[in-house]
Image (cartoon, grey):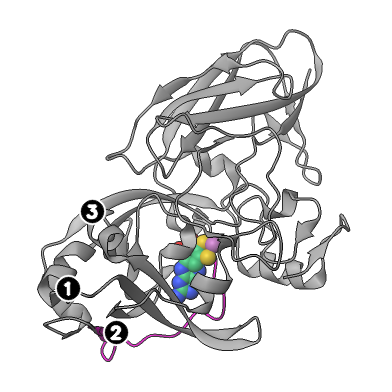
Amino acid sequence: MGVSSESGITHEELRLAARNHAMPLEALRWPITPVGLHYLLVHYDVPLVDPATWRLEVGGTVAQPLLTTLDELREWPSVELTATMECAGNGRALFEPRPLSQPWLTEAVGTAIWRGVPLAALLDEARPGSDAVEVVFSALDRGLEGGIEQRYARSLPLAEARESGAVLAYEMNGAPLPPQHGFPLRLVVPGWYGMTNVKWLTAVTLTTEPFAGYQQAMSYRYRQHEDEPGRPVTRMRPRSLLVPPGLPDFFTRERVVEGSPIALEGRAWSGGAPVARVEVSDDGGASWLEARLTRDLEGPWAWVRFELEWEPPRTGAFVLCSRATDETGATQPLEPEWNVGGYENNAVQRVSVTVR
Ligand SMILES: Nc1nc2c(c(=O)[nH]1)N[C@H]1C(S)=C(S)[C@@H](COP(=O)(O)O)O[C@H]1N2
Ligand SMILES: [Mo]
């Protein structure tokens, strides 16, 4: 992956940005992101899938291989999972120099209610062999990446597959998955960065060796240098985002607010542990005020809402920031921690506002 120190994005980045849209930040007002506002990331092409011929194949080192249709899968006992999902590349375009890939700013996130079959139930039915170490999830979409032709595939350690609360989802927010979000079936692993949640799923394969596919061994590694193996990208770091207050300027998106106090609100999440606190700063992170948290969604995997009545000490220009800390004490840095792939940038967001 190349980098660019140019502030202007390249034609290739612009094309990716137009295909893969972010969630407009004002959508942080909705607890559950309306489907069309949920962010979208598609590495190759959205496949056209015929639900009548589609099958899920469960195989590899298992005592009971399975081949199921969509209708059969819908007969299994199902669960609902409310989960916030964020692309591991969120914040990539804010790195300097900028890793060349999908140029996200801060808003590659969304929260949905997923309905489907618990992955653990499927694994119990298939009975993994005692030598099984990983579960590989393979999709229908194909493409080239790093010069290698492949179909999108990712793995999880068997223990994580069983214990993470992962779901094989066929519904998003009460309706069948739309094509772009993985119709007819996708994996959802709560707390993990987006790449784990394999869309257009067609095979679940138990292996006796760690998976060495492109999206596992080459991509989604946190590295400081091109030539080190790095560590795998796994769970979402803590992060918070403000609903941009006041009125936006059309072109610059700079905000103008009036009066006092000003109601600030936003959402915060972490894949490691529940969010413990959120603080807000009006001086670019020099001093912090404690925000009030509301847990308005089911379960531990959904973002929380935060709010604060802000009394601007003067009129003029301010830089607002928010900072989430989770129950492990993990928090957001003021500056991004650069890495080759441009992953896990959970540096505090900066929102420029002018108070009139
Ligand atoms: N089959 C397949 N699954 C995939 C992808 C993909 O390109 N192909 N993109 C991954 C990435 S990088 C992310 S961030 C999430 C995005 O999910 P969404 O588009 O439903 O928001 O899907 C993941 N699952
Ligand atoms: Mo992603």
Horizontal and vertical percent for residue 92? 68, 54
Q: Which residue is mark 3?
A: 80
Question: What amino acid type should be assigned to the residue bearing mark 2?
Answer: Pro
> Is residue 199 a member of the stretch shown in magenta?
no
Helix, strand or loop at label 2? It is loop
Determine which quarter of the picture holds residue 231: bottom right
Q: Is residue 180 visible?
A: no
Helix, strand or loop at label 3? It is strand
Horizontal and vertical percent for residue 102? 67, 64
Q: Nearer the viewer, residue 60 or 12?
A: 60
Label 2 or label 3, whichever comes before in sequence order: 2
Label 3 or label 1, whichever comes before in sequence order: 3
Residue that appears at 31% across and 39% down:
300
Q: Which residue is mark 2?
A: 51
Q: Are marks 2 and 3 in contact (CB under 8 Å)?
A: no
Compute the Cα span from label 3 to label 1: 30 Å
Question: What amino acid type should be assigned to the residue bearing mark 3?
Answer: Glu
Q: Is residue 308 above or below residue 184?
A: above
Magenta segment: 41-59
Question: What amino acid type should be assigned to the residue bearing mark 1?
Answer: Ser
Residue that appears at 59% across and 55% down:
22
Compute the Cα span from label 2 to label 3: 22 Å
